[in-house]
């Protein structure tokens, strides 16, 4: 399987304020990793860990201070490739209001393909397919500002889907949503992953990270842990030192093992834990 994302010795620096000659701070400090096409990777860390800065570098919204990022072989430092990169790797932001541009849902989803010069009949197909994928077809002619936060986020996802990206970067898409909205968005993310779209989920919810194929823990601009959820969440002491807690299902499985119940190591999500308990004899 080929890599759709390749990060090589990435450093991103910024000035804390506007004072001249101020020493720059590293939001990302010499990070390197690759992501295979079609996989679901969660990147998690506390506030200030560098995870959202990394997301914006992946989409070309920020340019590396040094090192490089390749998206499907395209270098994000090349200004001439920026729109091709953003079409390949779409991005869904934390606040959907920042991503909605029209007064009608249908027009909002069509906005991206129209700017790419896609033929009208294909735009029609893309809009219908994308809104169906997020379960919002009956809201096609509604005004976005009449929708709930979770519904707006689903429309924002549909707008990205209409661009037909190979990869979607979700930058804390559930941070502003209620529990039902979070569940709805995570259900969509998992369905898109099953369809073969590369998913990169930036989150601070451990339960969301547990749903991924791979978890990358960031701390102070560096990679702290990287691996499958069942492997990463075994490093309880390392996580504790970074002020991070285990996902609820992982913590509960650990407590059950202490009572002599042999919960399999692969159990990291609430669904997996419930399935195990229901089958336990």
Image (tube, helix red, strand yellow):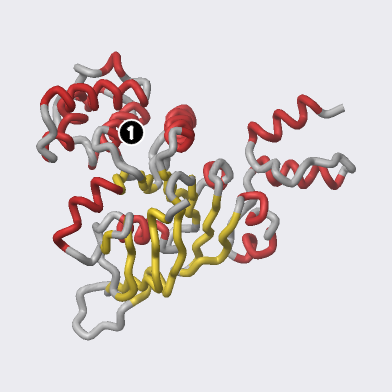
Image coordinates of residue 189 in percent, x first then y, are 44, 36
- Residue closest to the far front: 1
Image coordinates of residue 210 in percent, x first then y, are 58, 44
Give the image quarter of residue 26.
bottom left
Asked whether, in this view, residue 219 is left or right of residue 10, the answer is: right
Identity of the residue drawn at 86% across and 39% down: 261
Q: Looking at the image, can residue 182 be seen?
A: no
- Residue closest to the far top: 138
- Residue closest to the far right: 260
Would you name the residue on which mark 1 appears?
153
State the quadrant of the C terminus.
Answer: top right
Give the image quarter of residue 147.
top left
Question: 112 or 45: nearer the eye?
Answer: 112
Image coordinates of residue 10 in percent, x first then y, are 37, 71
Question: Where is 243 relative to 201, above or below?
Answer: below
Question: Where is 12 relative to 182, above or below?
Answer: below
Give the image quarter of residue 269.
top right
Identity of the residue drawn at 74% across and 46% down: 265
Asked whether, in this view, residue 193 is left or right of residue 240, the answer is: left
Identity of the residue drawn at 32% across and 62% down: 70
Image coordinates of residue 186 in percent, x first then y, are 47, 34
> Could you say whether the residue bearing mark 1 is in a helix, strand or loop?
helix
> Would you call the spot at circle 1 few (<14 residues within 10 Å), some (14-19), or many (20 or more)?
many
Count all numbered tags in the image, as a single digit: 1
- Residue closest to the far bottom: 21
Identity of the residue drawn at 23% across and 66% down: 77
Q: Looking at the image, can residue 87 be seen?
A: yes
């Amino acid at each position: 399987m080929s890599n759709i994302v390749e990060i090589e010795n990435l450093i991103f620096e910024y000035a804390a304020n506007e004072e001249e000659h101020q020493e720059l701070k590293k939001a990302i400090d010499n990070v390197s990793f690759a992501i295979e096409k079609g996989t679901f990777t969660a990147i998690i860390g506390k506030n200030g860990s560098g995870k959202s800065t990394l997301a914006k570098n992946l989409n070309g919204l920020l340019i590396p201070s040094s090192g490089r990022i390749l998206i499907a072989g395209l270098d994000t430092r090349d200004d001439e490739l920026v729109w091709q990169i953003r079409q390949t790797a779409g991005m869904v932001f934390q606040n959907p209001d920042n991503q909605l541009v029209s007064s009608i849902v249908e027009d909002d989803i069509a906005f991206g393909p129209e700017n790419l010069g896609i033929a009208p009949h294909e735009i029609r197909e893309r809009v219908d397919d994308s809104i169906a994928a997020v379960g919002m077809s009956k809201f096609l002619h509604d005004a976005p500002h009449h929708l709930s936060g979770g519904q707006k986020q689903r429309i924002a996802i549909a707008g990205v889907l209409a661009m037909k990206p190979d990869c979607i970067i979700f930058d804390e898409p559930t941070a502003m949503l209620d529990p039902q909205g979070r569940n709805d968005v995570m259900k969509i993310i998992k369905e898109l992953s099953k369809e073969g779209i590369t998913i990169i989920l930036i989150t601070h919810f451990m339960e969301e990270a547990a749903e991924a194929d791979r978890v990358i823990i960031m701390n102070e601009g560096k990679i702290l842990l990287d691996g499958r959820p069942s492997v990463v969440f075994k490093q309880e002491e390392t996580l504790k030192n970074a002020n991070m807690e285990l996902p609820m299902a992982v913590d509960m499985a650990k407590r059950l093992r202490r009572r002599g119940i042999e919960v399999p190591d692969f159990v990291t999500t609430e669904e997996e834990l419930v399935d195990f308990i229901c089958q336990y004899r």
